[in-house]
Amino acid sequence: MTTRNDIQRTLWKACDSFRGKIDSSRYKDYILSMLFVKYLSDVTKEMRAKYLVQYDGDLRRVERAMGRERFIVDAESTFDHLYANRTDGEIGQKINVALSRIEEHNSGKLRNVFRSIDFNSQVDFGDVKTKNATLRNLLEDFHDLDLRPGQLDSADIIGDAYEYMIANFASDAGKKGGEFFTPSKVSELVAALVKPRENDRIYDPTCGSGGLLLKACRMVPNGKVAVYGQELNAQTWALCTMNMFLHGVDDATIWQGDTLSNPQNVENDRLMKFQVVVANPPFSLDKWDSGFLSGASTDARGRKQEKMAASLDPWKRFDIGVPPSSKGDYAFVLHMLASLDEANGRMAVVLPHGVLFRGSAEGKIRRQLVDMNLLDAVIGLPANLFYGTGIPACILVFRKGRTRDDVLFIDASADGNFEKGKNQNVLRDSDIARIVRTYEARKRKVDKYSYRASRREIRENDYNLNIPRYVDTFEEEEPVDLDEVKRNIAGIEKELAKVQAQMAKYMKELGL
C-alpha cells in the first residue's frame, strides 16, 4: 500500500533534485505538475487493466470504456512513456508535448492548466546538459511511487499530499508563497463560520491554490455545492485547478484574471450571486485600481484619469465609497458584498486589523457597512498565523438580510487561544470550536473573550471597530507591597556591601 508518508517522502526527494538550482517558488510548479501526471497515469493504468480483464482483452471495447472515464491519458502522455525516454536529449520538450496532449484530451476540465509550465525552459533549468540531468532525476524520483487507486491507503491521500506540499512551499517561499495559500486551520474556521449548505453556490474571488474553497465544500457531506473562484496569478490558477481535480471537485469553475478590474463572475450581464463567499485577499494591496485606470478614457485634453472613481466600475461596486489606491482591502470586501445573495448570503473574509480603524475613505465605507446592517461579527486572530507576515489578522463576517441590530466582537488573540510554534502559530481544533461556539451563541458578554455591541454603541465609537474598544482583556496585576520591596532592597544593599568589602580585601592582598 502507498501511504501519505510514501508520497511526502517522494515529493521531498524531488525537491532535493531542484534545490540550489531553481527557486522554490518556481520548482513547486514542476514537482506538483509531475505528481499530477503520475497520478493521472497510474489511474489510467489501473482502469485499463481492469477493463482488459472485464472484456477478455477486447481492445475496442476497452478503448470505448476508457473514453467514458473522468479523464483521458493516451500512451504517449503517460508517466511511463516519459520515464522510458528519460535519457532522451529532448526530454524537456517531450514532457511539454505530453502535458499539451493531456490538456487537449481533457479540455473541458484541464484547458490551459499547464500553460505556465515549461519543462524546456532555459531560464529555469540552464544549459541543456543541466536541464536533462535535472529532469531525469525528477522522473526517477517519481518512478517507484505507486499511485493506483487500489494501492492507496486513503481516498483523499493524493489531494491531501498536494495540499501538504503547497503549504510547505508557502512556508519556504515566505511572503511571496503566503499569497497563494491560507493555513489549513484558518480555512477551516472561515468555512465553519459561513456554514455552507447543500445546493449553495460557494465563491472565493482570490482563491489562490483553492484551500478555502475545498474546506467550504467539505462542510457539505454529500458535496452537492457549486464551486467558483478567480485567481490573478496564472501559475497559482493552475495549482488551484489541479488541486480541485485531485480532490474530486471536477465541476469547479475557476477563472483566471483580475477580480477587481475584470471580474469573471458575470451572468446575464450582472454579477453572479452566491450564498457563500469566503476569501483571504492580499493584505492592503497597493495600486489595486491600476486595472481601472489603465482602461480609463481620456478627457478633452487627451489626459487619462489618474484617480479611481466609482464611475469607472461598470458593476457599481464602489458607489458607497472608493478605497484608497494604496490599500485594496475594502475593494475586495465591496466586490464580495456585491456578489453576495440578497436573501441568505453569508460571507467571511480574512483582513488586516487596519480595516477596523483606519480613517478617511475607509472610515466612510466602514460607516456605510454598519449603517446598512451588513456586518455580523469581528473576530481577532492570534499573530503569526500566516506565512510571510507576523501581523495579527481578523475575520469579518457579513450577512445579507440581517434583522439583528448588533455586532459580535471576539478576541481570540490572547495566549491560551492558540498553539505557539517555533516559526508559526497554529489554531487548534479546540480554538476553532470555541470561536464558532461563541459566534453562534452570541451571548452579551464572555469575560475577556467576546462582547455583543449594539450598532448604537458602534456609532458612539465613531464606527471604530477596534476590538479592544469592546472586549476588555485587561488583566489586573497583583498589588505591590512597597514595604516588602523596601525590605528586599535593604537586604540586597547589605549583601552588596559585604561582597564589596570582600573584594577590597582580595585586591589589597594582591597588591592592586
Image (tube, helix red, strand yellow):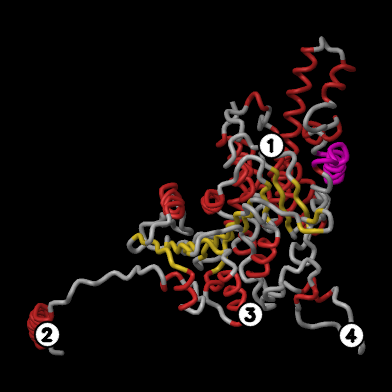
Foreground: disc 2 or disc 3: 3
Q: In front: mark 3 or mark 1?
A: 3
Q: Is the magenta stretch mostly helix, strand or loop?
A: helix
Q: Earlier in the sequence, mark 2 or mark 3?
A: 3
The answer to which of 268 and 211 lies nearer the viewer is 268
What's the residue type where badge 2 is placed? Gln
Residue that label 1 marks? 248
| Mark 4 or mark 3: whose residue is earlier in sequence | 4
CA gap, disc 3 and disc 1: 43 Å
Which is in the foreground here, disc 4 or disc 2? 4
Mark closest to the chain's N terminus, 1 or 4? 1
Magenta residues span 87-109
Expressed as whole percent of the image width and height from the top left, the position of residue 201 reads: 68, 47
Residue 388 visible in the shown view: no
Sort mark 1 into few (<14), some (14-19) or many (20+) by Cα contacts within 10 Å: some
**59 relative to 89, above or below:** above
Residue in the image at 73% along x and 42% along y: 34
Type of amino acid at the residue the image marks with label 4 = Asp
Q: Compare marks 4 and 2 and give the one earlier in the sequence.
A: 4
The residue to which callout 3 is attached is 361
Judging from the image, what secondary structure is the residue with disc 4 in?
loop
Quadrant containing the C terminus in the rendered view = bottom left
Snapshot quadrant of residue 489: bottom left
Residue type marked 3: Ala
Quadrant assignment for the N terminus? top right
